[in-house]
């Protein structure tokens, strides 16, 4: 199988705030993500689960480079994501998506499911017509059906 995402030794630490008037200074450091390694092959479904505060969101934001890791390696389709900058990084992000753990916070009850699924295409590929977006949405091939 072809490796789609490879993560090795990923680490992210933060400094606790020192108080109301000096946030981010003087506090002890804590580790949010430590030595995380995994790989995801093309066509696989991958989920991260854990208790509140264990680092799931920090891991996802680090993979998308919304926050910078302190160390480790992230490769997506063989490309070193930590070496990307500017437009090249923004372009790569269009190939990735974070799915939030709380569906009530991430799904808009005023939108139909089809509209929610089509929204990223409207944002990242604005030149597509409504018919083309619909064709792209329905062309997704899933590796297997859920029962």
Image (cartoon, rainbow, N blue to C red):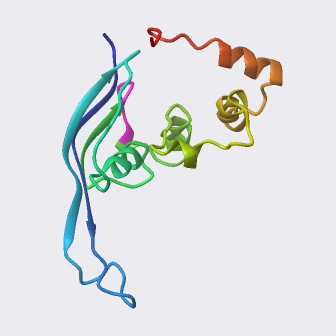
Residue 125 position within the rendered picture, expressed as x and y whole percent measured from the top left: 70, 31
- Residue furthest out toward the front: 147
- Which residue is at 74% across, 19% downward? 134
- Which residue is at 46% across, 47% downward? 85
Is 114 positioned to the left or the right of 23 in the image? Answer: right
- Asked whether 80 falls inside the magenta stretch, the response is yes
Residue 31 position within the rendered picture, expressed as x and y whole percent measured from the top left: 21, 60
Residue 32 position within the rendered picture, expressed as x and y whole percent measured from the top left: 25, 57
15 is higher (above) or lower (below) than 39: below
Q: Which of the 4 quarters of the picture holds residue 75? A: top left
Is 73 positioned to the left or the right of 61 in the image? Answer: left
Residue 38 position within the rendered picture, expressed as x and y whole percent measured from the top left: 24, 31
User: Magenta part of the protein: which range?
Assistant: 76-81
- Asked whether 103 falls inside the magenta stretch, the response is no
Q: Work out whether residue 64 or residue 84 is closer to the camera in this orientation and state it.
A: 64
Q: Work out whether residue 116 or residue 146 is closer to the camera in this orientation and state it.
A: 146
- Which residue is at 50% across, 12% downward? 142
């Amino acid at each position: 199988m072809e490796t789609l995402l490879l993560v090795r030794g990923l680490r992210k630490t933060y400094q606790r705030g020192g108080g109301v008037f000096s946030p981010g200074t003087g506090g002890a450091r804590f580790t949010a993500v430590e030595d995380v390694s995994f790989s995801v092959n093309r066509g696989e479904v991958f989920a991260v689960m854990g208790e509140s505060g264990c680092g799931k969101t920090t891991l996802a934001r680090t993979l998308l480079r919304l926050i910078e890791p302190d160390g480790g390696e992230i490769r997506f389709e063989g490309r070193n994501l930590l070496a990307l900058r500017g437009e090249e990084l923004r372009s790569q992000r269009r190939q990735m998506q974070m799915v939030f753990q709380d569906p009530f916070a991430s799904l808009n009850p005023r939108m139909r499911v089809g509209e929610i699924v089509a929204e990223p295409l409207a944002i990242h590929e604005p030149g597509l017509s409504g018919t083309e977006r619909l064709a792209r949405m329905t062309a997704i091939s899933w590796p297997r059906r859920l029962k």
